Image: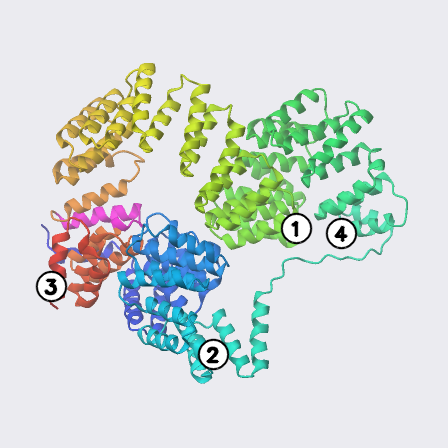
């Protein structure tokens, strides 16, 4: 083995040059934070983040500092960015939940406890915070139901019983409150939280003096808790001890300057001490903070003439035109042309209701002009009043039989129902001899909606053939070229248009689309901003800009632009669809649900929207409502077996196994000889432990299709569900022998080998698979990992090296990481090289960071080793190996107290891992410190 001292230089070269500075700043920040030198900690943390803005431990610490200092929105930004960077949810969500709570973002809090991958302790913490959020939403009964529904999961958690006691105090049910409080005291020690609840109960019983005594004791035990401090201050104020109350309020103000509840308490004390003016000032300040301007007033006065209105319309000054033409119509008999100009102006301004009123008022006149009648129909469709257009169609058929405009109206009605295929077929058959370019344009739109951009591109070419110099047609052609990734063609046309008309909006939007497709989001945003500076109401620019901001995770900007677009095109589905997507990305389920409900009010029978609503409701744990939505989908898909199969999977997510079974049985009934549906049905039965029924279905399947890899796979699952691991292994082996490319059985066998099933049989089978197909990379990977896990390092190295020769093989970083671990005790220099290769490929993996940090620690490079181990812990705080490695490092550098805390606070010694005995020995030495 090579000298560890010799490797220090090599290890240093493997990290960025600023790592030492970042690590140094972070360690100083952490020490200052522990010593409650918050300002010093802030400065050190800021220095660390200036060196590396993505350093997750520093980002998390900065969030905690900002939260403590009352800079709540800034702390939220830090926590959310830490999550996006891959930080462990268990470290971030408890603080983020508190920040959301303090900001009144209750909808973001209520479902955090359902996040996957949480420890029991963190999940309970978030459950309690969720309960508090519901209280603040005015849903205290829901809060109680939530807590009581989780009693079986946390039967031995005093905090849950204490919180329930508190909730029942709030609804004046003191009997239940006392019962839950007694239960809390039986389970746990008298913590400040339980003691505080006791005080509230005494207060509710009217024992003010006793309550005050308890609240003072709570304050002594936990002197910096704002909730306890507020209650104590309120109690002092009610007992007219105003000086003592003011002292506490001032302390809270220093701790959390923007605390709304504290401002209200301060105003209350001022009012009680007859300082009404000062109290009113605070209340007025709060009123101003809570008042939001939600609408712009548009009350233009009608003052201008017909000529000015027509000139305004010709010059595309639709605001001016609508005002003047309406003024004219209020005094003179209308003509169909003036009605058309006024309605069109109002539409372009987004005043759909006003346009409808004008057209409905003069319906007899508009029927005299097919173009204005068509405009009327388009408006009805746009404002979700298609039935009114449908009522006009028979009258138009009678007046204009076979007229192409009537065909276009009927086509658009089909489009409004989402029947794009039927619309295209009807338009094509009804306009075979039409040379009208608006027919071609509608065909292009239909083809684009159907995703047939190749034919749309061909039709757009026909437009250009008719009028090569038409800029509008050039824009359409370029836009479709972008969708086909023909960026050079699109760019050529866009440049040609902009040269002639530098401010052409269509060309600029397409230019931005090209830039976005070329992965140049910032130039694209700059292009779109230039459009919006000229025309803030341009919906196309707003939508594309919002999409780009969302792709860059700039959600606030995206939402603002989409809300504007929605206001401008109130009945358009596109802004709402994008809002649903952004809200779901942010896990803002309330926002997503509100938008999907509006979409369903526009297209009530859309299965896409019904499914999205169901998925949102599932995420909100409102499974009963989700099942109802999926039931409506079943009604529409009852005759489509493949869709029923897809529906069953969603129904299982909603815990609607009865509905999933119904869907699969309906699919089987439609296509009885389709094995896939039967396999899915058997899989459902096994997962539901309906094993007798599953056994019968397996026999039926074998009688219909014979013994197949899939049937053997399910027999293996059946045996596993019965607890017969040996039989399960045998069936999985048989499945894989029938189909060597079937991945599921060898993955199942790999897991069973870990549980003690025959290693030799597994290795023999994997070798046989590789003998038949040397390119079976999954089999080779499982072989290498099995050899690695069983300490057969020489053979593992051979297999890993063969995998590394495969181009574009996924998860190569983990191969390098395992090789680093193998070489740790053989050749540390080589181990570090492998670790560097792993980090280059996956720099945000906790396991890989841990390996590199551990290697550096063993090399004696404690500072850089600790920096990487801290990052690993930030990404995954539950890995006991990382706990041990950090404690080992800290102990080696004399930070024995912190080393002890790492092992004790994370309950490391209660977990099973390869270094457990070493961790126990270290812990013992630290206990004797």
Give residue 537's mark.
Answer: 1
Give the mark, 3 or 2, whose residue is nearer the N terminus.
2
Task: State the scheme by which the image is colored.
Answer: rainbow
User: Residue beneath label 4, please?
Assistant: 319
Residue contact at pointers 2 and 1, CB within 8 angstroms: no
Q: Which residues are magenta?
A: 827-848
Residues 63 and 593: in front is 593
**Among the two numbered marks 2 and 4 on one chain, the one whose residue lies closer to the N terminus:** 2
Q: Nearer the viewer, mark 4 or mark 3?
A: 3
Q: Is residue 882 magenta?
A: no
Residue assigned mark 2: 238
Residue drawn at (30%, 36%) of the image: 809
Q: Residue at x 11, y 62 (%)?
A: 924
Mark 4 secondary-structure assignment:
helix
Q: Is residue 712 visible?
A: yes
Q: Residues within 10 Å of mark 1 (few under 14, many from 20)?
A: some
- Callout 4 environment at 10 Å: few (<14), some (14 to 19), or many (20+)? some
Q: Position of residue 681 (x, y in %)?
A: 37, 26
Is 142 situated left or right of 161 in this image?
Answer: right
Looking at the image, which residue is at 82% across and 37% down?
363
Structural distance between the alpha carbons of marks 4 and 1: 12 Å
373 is higher (above) or lower (below) than 165: above
Label 4 – label 3 distance at C-alpha: 81 Å
Q: Nearer the viewer, residue 741 or 281?
A: 281
Helix, strand or loop at mark 1: loop
Q: Quadrant of residue 691?
A: top left
Closer to viewer: mark 3 or mark 2: 2
In this rendering, which labeled residue sits more in front, label 1 or label 3? 3
Residue 55 visible to an observer of this rendering: no
Front-lying residue, 1 or 310: 310
Nearest-to-viewer mark from 2 and 4? 2
Pick whichever of labels 4 and 3 is earlier in the sequence: 4
């Amino acid at each position: 083995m090579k000298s560890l001292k010799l490797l220090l230089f090599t290890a240093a070269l493997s990290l960025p040059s600023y790592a030492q500075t970042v690590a140094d700043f972070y360690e100083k920040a952490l020490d200052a934070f522990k010593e409650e030198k918050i300002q010093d900690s802030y400065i050190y943390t800021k220095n660390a983040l200036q060196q590396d803005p993505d350093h997750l431990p520093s980002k998390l610490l900065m969030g905690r500092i900002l939260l403590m200092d009352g800079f709540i929105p800034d702390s939220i930004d830090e926590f959310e960015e830490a999550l996006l960077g891959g930080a462990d949810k268990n470290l971030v969500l408890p603080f983020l939940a508190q920040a959301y709570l303090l900001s009144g973002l209750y909808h973001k809090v209520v479902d955090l406890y359902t996040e996957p991958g949480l420890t029991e302790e963190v999940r309970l913490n978030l459950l309690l915070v969720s309960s508090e959020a519901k209280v603040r939403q005015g849903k205290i009964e829901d809060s109680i139901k939530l807590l009581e529904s989780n009693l079986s999961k946390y039967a031995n958690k005093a905090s849950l019983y204490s919180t329930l006691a508190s909730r029942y105090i709030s609804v004046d049910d003191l009997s239940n409150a006392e019962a839950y409080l007694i239960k809390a005291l039986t389970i746990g020690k008298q913590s400040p939280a339980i003691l505080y609840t006791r005080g509230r109960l005494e207060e509710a019983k009217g024992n003010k003096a006793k309550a005050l005594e308890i609240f003072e004791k709570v304050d002594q035990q936990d002197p910096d808790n704002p909730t306890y401090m507020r209650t104590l201050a309120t109690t002092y104020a009610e007992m007219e001890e105003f000086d003592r109350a003011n002292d506490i309020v001032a302390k809270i103000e220093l701790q959390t300057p923007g605390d709304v509840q504290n401002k209200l308490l301060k105003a209350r004390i001022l009012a009680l001490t007859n300082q009404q003016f000062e109290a009113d000032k605070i209340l007025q300040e709060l009123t101003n903070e809570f008042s939001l301007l939600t609408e712009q007033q548009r009350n233009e006065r009608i003052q201008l003439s017909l000529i000015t209105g027509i000139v305004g319309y010709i010059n595309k000054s639709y605001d001016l035109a609508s005002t003047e033409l309406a003024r004219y119509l209020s005094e003179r008999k209308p003509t169909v042309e003036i009605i058309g100009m006024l309605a069109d102006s109002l539409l372009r301004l987004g005043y759909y209701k006003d346009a409808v009123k004008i057209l409905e008022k003069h319906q007899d006149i508009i029927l005299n002009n097919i173009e204005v009648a068509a405009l009327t129909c388009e408006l009805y469709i746009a404002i979700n009043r298609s039935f009114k257009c449908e009522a006009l169609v028979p009258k138009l058929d009678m007046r204009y039989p076979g007229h192409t405009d009537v065909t276009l109206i009927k086509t658009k009605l089909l489009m409004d129902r989402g029947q794009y295929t039927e619309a295209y077929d009807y338009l094509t058959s009804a306009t075979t001899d039409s040379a009208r370019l608006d027919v071609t344009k509608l065909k292009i739109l239909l083809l684009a909606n159907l995703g047939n951009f190749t034919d749309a591109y061909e039709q757009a070419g026909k437009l250009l053939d008719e009028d090569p110099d038409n800029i509008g047609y050039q824009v359409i052609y370029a836009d479709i070229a972008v969708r086909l990734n023909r960026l050079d063609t699109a760019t050529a046309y866009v440049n040609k248009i902009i040269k002639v008309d530098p401010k052409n909006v269509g060309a600029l939007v397409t230019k931005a689309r090209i830039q976005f497709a070329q992965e140049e989001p910032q130039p694209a945003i700059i292009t779109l901003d230039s459009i919006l500076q000229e025309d803030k109401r341009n919906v196309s620019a707003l939508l594309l800009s919002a999409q780009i901001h969302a792709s860059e995770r700039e959600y606030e900007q995206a939402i603002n632009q989409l809300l504007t677009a929605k206001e401008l095109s109130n009945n358009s589905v596109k802004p709402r669809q994008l809002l649903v997507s952004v809200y779901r990305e942010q896990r803002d389920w309330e926002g997503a649900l509100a938008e999907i409900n509006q979409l369903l009010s526009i297209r009530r029978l859309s299965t896409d929207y019904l499914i999205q609503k169901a998925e949102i409701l599932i995420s909100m744990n409102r499974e009963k409502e989700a099942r109802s939505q999926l039931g409506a989908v079943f009604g529409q898909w009852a005759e489509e077996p493949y869709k029923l199969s897809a529906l069953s999977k969603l129904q299982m997510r909603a815990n609607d196994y009865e509905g999933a079974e119904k869907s699969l049985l309906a699919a089987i009934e439609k296509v009885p000889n389709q094995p896939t549906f039967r396999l899915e049905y058997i899989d459902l039965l096994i997962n539901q432990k309906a094993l007798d029924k599953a056994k019968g279905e397996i026999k039926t399947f074998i009688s219909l299709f014979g013994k197949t890899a899939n049937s053997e796979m399910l027999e293996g699952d059946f045996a596993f569900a019965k607890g017969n691991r040996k039989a399960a292994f045998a069936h999985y082996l048989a499945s894989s022998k029938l189909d060597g490319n079937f991945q599921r059985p060898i993955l199942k066998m790999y897991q069973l080998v870990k549980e003690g099933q025959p290693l030799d049989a597994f290795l023999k089978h994997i070798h046989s698979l590789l003998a038949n197909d040397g390119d079976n990379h999954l089999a080779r990977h499982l072989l290498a990992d099995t050899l690695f896990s069983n300490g057969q390092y020489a053979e593992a190295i051979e297999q890993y090296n063969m995998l590394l020769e495969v181009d574009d093989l996924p998860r190569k970083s983990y191969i390098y990481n395992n090789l680093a671990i193998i070489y740790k005790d053989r050749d540390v220099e080589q181990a570090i090289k492998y670790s560097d290769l792993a980090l280059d490929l996956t720099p945000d993996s906790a396991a890989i960071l841990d390996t590199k940090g551990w290697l550096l620690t063993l090399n004696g490079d404690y500072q850089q080793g600790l920096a990487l181990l801290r990052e690993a812990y930030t990404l995954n705080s539950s890995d006991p190996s990382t706990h041990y490695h950090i404690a080992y490092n800290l102990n080696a550098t004399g930070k024995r107290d912190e080393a002890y805390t790492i092992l004790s606070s994370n309950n490391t010694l209660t977990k099973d891992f390869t270094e457990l005995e070493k961790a126990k020995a270290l812990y013992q030495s630290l206990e004797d410190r």
